[in-house]
Structure formats: C-alpha cells, structure tokens
Image (cartoon, rainbow, N blue to C red):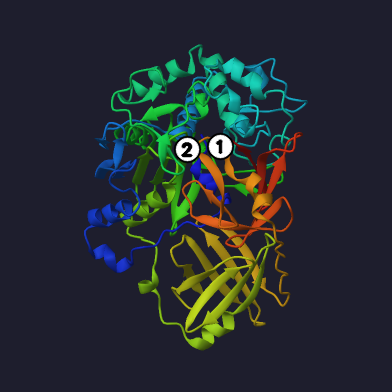
Amino acid sequence: MRTRFFTSVVFLILMIGLFSNSMMAQNTEAVMDQIIENVYKPGEPGATVLVAKNGKVVYRKAFGMANLELSVPMKPEMVFEIGSITKQFTAVSILMLMEQGKLSLNDDITKFIPDYPTQGHNITIHHLLTHTSGIKSYTGMQEWQPLWRKDMSPAEMIDVFKNQPMDFAPGEKFLYNNSAYFLLGYIIEKASGLTYEQFLEDNIFKPLQMNNSYYGSQKKIIPNRAAGYQHQDGFTNAEYLSLTQPYSAGSIMSNVDDMLKWQNAIRGNKLVKASTIQLAFKGYSTNDNKPFHYGYGWGLNEINGSPTLEHGGGIFGYTTNGIWLPREDVYVIMLTNRDDLAPEGISTRLAAVAIGKPFPVIADGIELKPETAADLTGWYAFEDGSFRNIIYEDGVLYSQRKGSSRFRLIPLSESRFAFENSLSMLEFAKNENGIHSVVFKNRINEIRGGKTDKIPEEKKEITLSPEQMQPFTGEYEIQPGFSLVVTLENGHLMTQATGQAKFEIYPESEVKFFLKVVDAQIEFQRNKDGVVDSLILFQNGAEIRAIKK
C-alpha cells in the first residue's frame, strides 16, 4: 500500500543511466526492451509494461513469469494488485462526490464519522487527501500485523487505529498515511450510500469499460491473475493479506490496458471537470507554508525538466508505478508480481526515453578543464545538515557525501554535473566574491549548499561480535511489500531495502548503526522481554519505524 513515489527517503541510490543520448538513434522499442530485460529475467516473476503517447499505445509487452508453480509466462493482459495507485481512484471518487454536492473538501471528518476521536483537532477531508492529517498510519503499527489474514469491515479496521495518539496536529506536516485514505473510503460510503466497492464499479469501472479491474479479493476467481511473489533466499508465494484491510488505500486490481483507460479518462476529464481534477494535480503546503510535492492521489515530480504526475504502489507480492508527463502527453504504467524490485527507476527511464530525454552517461559528458575541476573541489555544507566532498582525481570529478561511497560526476557543462548511474545532479555557481554555492537535485527535490572550511567529523565505528549482532537479523517491514532485510555475513551486518542494493551498516553503539553510502542511521529496538522487535531508520530528518516480521 505504500507509494513507491516516496520511498526515496530510504537508501536513495537509484541506478538509472545506462543509455546515452546517441543511442536514441537506435530503435526506441529495442532500447526499452533492454532497459527492462536487464532487470526482469526469464524464469523469474516479471512485469507488464505499457507506454502511451497522446492516449495511444506505443509500447506494450510482458516479461518473466506470471506463475512459477504452473510455469505460466507473463502476458500483457495479466491482472495485478496495484497497491497504492488505488489512492488515485479514491481521490477522484471524493472529487466526484464534491461535484455532486455531497461533501466539501473542508468538511470535518466527523460530519461523516461522528464518533471518530479527533482529539480536539479539526481534521478535514483535505487533510486526509494530502497526507497531512496527523492520524497514525495503521500500516506502521505493530498491532496490525497479527490481523493480516482476517476479513474486517471498514468500521472494524478504523477501530484498530482511531484511538492511537496523533503524530502531529493537522496540517503541520506531510507524512504518507494509509489510515487517511482508508478513512476516505469510509467517507465515500457514507456520502454516497454505496459500499466503496460498488461505488467504484458503478461510477468508474463500468462507465470506462475497465472490465479487468476489481476491488481486490484473495477468494474470488480473477481471470488472468498474476501470482504474487516475495524474495528472500529464493522466491516464495506472497504473504496472505485480506484485501479488506488495504481497502481504499490499496485494494484495487487491474492490468495495463485498463490503467490506460483510467489515464485517458483523467486526461480527457471524463469523470470530473478539468478545473476539479487540477485540485489533484497541484502541490500543497503545510501550516507554516512549507510546500510538499503531493496533490490528491498524485505525486508531483519531473524528468529532466519535464513535469510529471505519478504514483506507485507496493503490497504483498506486487510493486507498481505509473507516470504521466502532461506536457508531452506520455503515460508509462508498469505492474509487477514481485515485491523485491522497485519499478519506479525503470519506469522513469522508460518515460525519459519516450520523451527523448534519456539520462546522461559518461559518453555524454564534455571535456572539463583541469583548472575548472580543481576550482570546484572541497567540502560543501548543505541546508539539511549533510556534507559533500568534491574530489578531482586522475582527470575525473567525484562527489562523496560524508561517510558514504564516492560517485563519479559527468560534466554536462562547466557548472552542471550528473551523477553516474543516478537521477541526481549537482549545479554549481560562483558569485562576484568568488564564493561557491551548489544545488543538489534529485528530480524535483533540491537541497542548497555552499563551500565550507569546516570539515565534518566522521562517525566512529566500534567493534561488536557476531553474537552481539545476530539478534538484529531478520526482516523489518516498513509497509506491506516494503521491508529492510538485515543479515549477518562473515561478521558484517548488512541491510537491503526492497528493490535496492545491499549495504553494510556499521555499529556506533550496541544498538545503533550507520550507513556509509548515505547519511542514514538505524537503531534497533527491544521489547520489554529484551527481544529485538523493531528498528527506527533515521534519514533526511525523518524517523521511520519498521516492525520485525
């Protein structure tokens, strides 16, 4: 149910660039094939991919296997659980009811759920849509895991989280929240007089002829259902989750063809007016006017200067991602039946190729004068508290974040540099006094910094025995389908986020570890019996709790 649009907070090392601009002269289909085939191998769980331009299909293929036990190859028609892309359908359903006069975005949620304990706060539908409600997200609660297999009514699920302490006052922060979108589904039922499932069927699926889309179920016979898989020491069938629990936050099933019908309905204003859907496509701000890049069910981003509207999903055994570039009118949808590989990196590369803006590689770089490169070297301090060292060595410029690995920089101009195999960029500037400044960019996200004479202190690593570290091993779930797996390998503690590379973590105390590839720390937590049952990931000012499975 998590949106993979926001998993960048966890170990942000997205390997993107493999194709130079010169390769665009090649057949685009072949380039896309190679991008996907490098990741989704024959004989393994796979993916379906569709790319559309101006609403028409320009690429539609399937890769890998739909069912390992029955040796069924993947087909483009296969149906998947789409996870948090469900939130787009929930948001548009709310906007449809708004146009019908059955609710207002400024309505307090108690108008529809009178007994909801708002703890003295005014929590509006707008707060729910924008993940700014402050309500505790049930998918991060330890109490939720034992309930996974149980069919529950919306009211029963709301009882699971409604009495939890608020994380913050409404509007104070943006924090991705499955409870919020669950409540929106219940509000849809109260305002429409229909179940959430029936509302979708009557108002979206049937009118758009989305004949391969469903409110998900593990019990029903779903034609062309692709089996879901998880991976740890080999592939296993996905953990069972009653789809009554993701509900309006993540329970829809669909295929790429129906998702294009959905996209075309959105771009053609078939469900709500143009002025109404724009409410979903704009960014909002917190109470203190800090902007965040999320609307109603869509995240805002960019690809090499082209604005995007996108969302991803992850649920047991499935990961998904959809990207729309309104300016070029290109849509990329990718559905997979494995939750160990994040598809957003691949779908972003496909979108970049489709709009003729592939990410740069070494072959695209210019020749940089040694004196220009040398002038940029040194430490830079950034507004988020991080430090980055620019190094010039053997004719190559590198960037190394404090405590992390070194990454090669590709000079696109004398001041603009791309990270090799990454979405990230550095843009340098120099004022009239000769003082350097820099902007670190990862797509839409920017962090500003400046050259500094203060060299940061490195974290000090201590020594722990394998016996001391063994209790920390295991899988820690951040949200369904997205985990950190901790392993002990030859006396070294390693961690691997779903769909990302494996990295060593280094002890700075008996329970707290740090990474060197990014500025992030992990602190393991014990319960009252002394058993390790969770961890907290500290990164970019966020504290993310993960429960041990």
At mark 1, the secondary structure is strand
Percent across and percent down for residue 56 are 25, 41
* Mark 1 lies on residue: 479
Q: Residue furthest bottom?
A: 371
Q: Position of residue 451 (x, y in %)?
A: 66, 75
The part of the image, by quadrant, that contains residue 463 is bottom right
Q: First in sequence: mark 1 or mark 2?
A: 2
Amino acid type of the residue tagged 1 in the rendering: Gln
Q: Residue furthest top?
A: 193
Q: Is residue 271 visible?
A: no
Q: Is residue 54 above or below residue 207?
A: below
Q: 215 and 459: which one is in front? A: 459
The residue at the point 43 percent across, 59 percent down is: 304
Say left or right for 10 vs 220.
right
Alpha carbon distance from label 1 to label 2: 8 Å
Q: Quadrant of residue 203?
A: top left
Q: Secondary structure at mark 2?
A: strand
Asked if residue 466 lies left or right of residue 417, the reply is right
Query: Of residues 133 and 546, which is closer to you in this image?
Result: 546
Q: Nearer the viewer, residue 484 or 3?
A: 484
Residue 144 visible in rendering:
yes
Q: Which mark is residue 314?
A: 2
Say which residue appears at 51% left-offset and 26% top-offset.
246
- Residue 268, how many percent across, how many down? 35, 35
Task: Give the quarter of the figure containing the C terminus.
Answer: top right
Taking the spot 70% from the left edge, 34% from the top edge, the residue there is 170
Q: Position of residue 139 (x, y in %)?
A: 59, 32
Q: Is residue 268 left or right of residue 149?
A: left
Please, what is the three-letter code of the amino acid marked with disc 2?
Gly
Dot 2 alpha-carbon crowd within 10 angstroms: few under 14, some 14 to 19, many 20 or more: many
Question: Decide: marks 1, 2 in contact (CB < 8 A)?
Answer: yes
